[in-house]
Image (cartoon, rainbow, N blue to C red):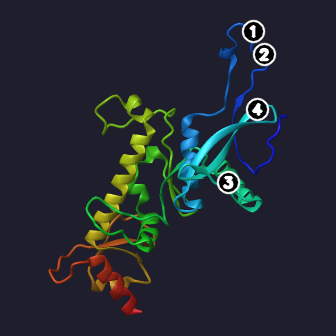
Amino acid sequence: MDVIVNSDYVLTPYYDGIITDTTRPFWYEYQFNNYTPYDFFVLKTRLTYDVPQGYNIHFDSFRYEGQMRYCVLFSNGYTIVPITKEQTAYYQNCVNQIILNHSHHCTLVHMSQPFLTTNYDQSLSQRWVKTILPYCYKQLIKEQYQPILFNNQLLINIDPTRVYDDTDINNNVDDYYKDYNAVYDVLQTNLINNLFNLYQQGIIVLNKDLDQDFINHWQLKPYYDTGDQTQIYVARWTNKDIQDKTAFLENQLRLSY
């Protein structure tokens, strides 16, 4: 029967074509599909924070409407977890929205994730990252990765089929970007470490007009002067009695109002 039965499935648009006549010579050369491994990588990173913690995301194909259509499956350890009709509808909508919105962009960071760095034994505040990231992500992520803030996520495009020109890489650029998993890991680690470095410097989001007295009093300067009314400011001074300048400035700002 050319239909999925006896279970609820979350469909992706990706499939393998079905060759009906395998008796013809070299029939396998006519096999076709409409996806790359990177397409599944995108779906997995984008879906990760929509599923319960501890769930793993998998993709498997089933015969459906004349295709071997790939579906999303969830497991807890080694066991596939069945989902209800309500959950199926929810995750189907998630997949549909990913395909409709920046389908070649994977999630580099999500605002709800822990932000642990290699220099810090505690997470950066999610609230601070969510506040600060809109004003610095374009400076922290190269334009060639097409960074986008969307739905509480920082998305990047590291599709290995794209053409890159990165003067920071000494080896073969094309070979480097084919390993998008390695590119992803490096970019994510660098981003979180750079956010930590910003936090250490005393970074705070302020409005040039509304917070001008506070800016003047604490001698703050724009960190990336974008010309916008609201942007991030930095404390250029040092004080041995203030170990955490960012937390200190945020507290002083609350007290000033």
Residue type indicated by callout 2: Asp
In terms of image quadrants, where is residue 38? top right
Is residue 213 in view?
no
Dot 1 alpha-carbon crowd within 10 angstroms: few under 14, some 14 to 19, many 20 or more: few
Label 2–label 4 contact, CB within 8 A = no
Query: Which of pointers 1 and 3 indicates the residue nearer the eye?
Result: 1
Alpha carbons under labels 3 and 4: distance apart: 22 Å
Could you tell me the amino acid type at mark 3? Gln
**Label 3 crowding class (10 Å Cα cut-off): few <14, some 14-19, many 20+?**
few
Q: How far apart are the two marked residues, 2 and 1, measured between alpha carbons? A: 6 Å
What amino acid type is highlighted by mark number 1? Arg
Comes first in the chain, label 3 or label 4: 4
20 horizontally vs 152: left or right: right
Q: Which residue is mark 1?
A: 24
Q: Which one is nearer the viewer's eye here, 246 or 228? A: 246
Q: To which quarter of the image does residue 133 belong?
A: bottom left
How far is mark 1 from mark 3, CA to CA? 40 Å
Judge by depth and name the residue closer to the eye, 220 or 70. Answer: 70
> Which residue is tagged 3?
97
Q: Is residue 107 above or below residue 181?
A: below
Residue 174 locus on image (x, y percent): 41, 29
Residue for point 28% across, 33% down: 170
User: SS for tag 3?
Assistant: helix
Per the rendering, the mark at residue 21 is 2
- Badge 4 or badge 1: first in the primary sequence: 1
Q: Residue at x 70, y 13 (%)?
A: 27
Q: Which residue is mark 4?
A: 67
- Which label's residue is closer to the chain start, 3 or 2? 2
